[in-house]
Image: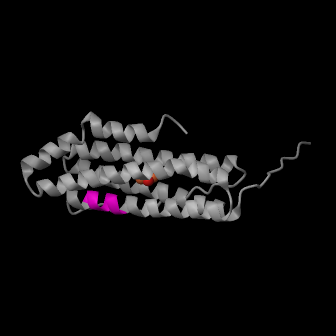
Amino acid sequence: MITLYKIHDMNKRVEKALNDQIEKEASSSQFYLAMASWAETKGLNGTAKFMYLHTDEERFHMLKLIKFVNERGGTAIVPGLEQPPTEFKNLENVFQLLLEHELAVTESINSIVDVCLQEKDYTTHNFIQWYVSEQLEEEALARTILDKVRMIDSDKAGLYMLDRDLENSTIQATIASTSGPGV
Ligand code: FEO
């Protein structure tokens, strides 16, 4: 008979912090999926495409964490789904919420860095640096788009062009390049 032993070598505080982050990435994915769906129903196809890509990216962030926790001897917890909003006031509201959400995620990533240093878990500290850089890019992108939305205000032609721009390869490529090919 073969006995399977699980060697638990992940620091408990680090494991908890990473599991909390898994939940945050999952809820980000749901949030952006709700935004994608809302934009699609409003005929904002460029915004919808942008958000559909973003929801996949957040899922990738979650999967990367799940695999890391399990491979390091911890136990990843797959979180339940919470109902995201179905309505948003307008495009500015969507991108304002996106930026606020990303700022909160950055704070949470920074707190994981703190825990890693306190617990002297340098392997996880090294792993989480990828998320630190990722957050820089995501915040910058969200700010740029929000600035543009505010610039056009309620001008319909401007809105049309912005939505079309969101479909263009530059912005889409920025997101795609941060998602990576696999976990
Ligand atoms: Fe996974 Fe947008 O942070």
Q: Residue at horizontal 49%, vertical 34%?
A: 181
Task: Judge from the rendering whether residue 24 lies leftward or rightward of residue 86; answer left or right.
Answer: right
**In the rendered structure, which segment of residues is drawn in magenta?**
94-100
Residue 100 screen position, x and y as percent? 34, 63
> Where is the C terminus found, in terms of image quarters?
top right
Q: How many marks?
A: 0
Front residue of 135/75: it is 135
**Residue 139 image position (x, y, % from top left):** 36, 54
Q: Quadrant of the N terminus?
A: top right
Please provide percent x and percent y for residue 22. 54, 56
Q: Is the stretch drawn in magenta largely helix, strand or loop?
A: helix
Asked if one can make out residue 31 in the rendered structure from this viewpoint, the answer is yes
In which quadrant of the rendered view does residue 14 lie?
bottom right
In magenta stretch: residue 99? yes
- 170 left or right, relative to 65: left
Where is residue 59 shown, x and y percent of the image?
A: 47, 48
Residue 29 visible in rendering = no
Between 171 and 60, the residue placed more toward the observer is: 171
Q: Residue lying farthest right?
A: 1
Q: Residue at x 27, y 58 (%)?
A: 94
Q: Residue at x 43, y 52 (%)?
A: 135
> Image quadrant of residue 101?
bottom left
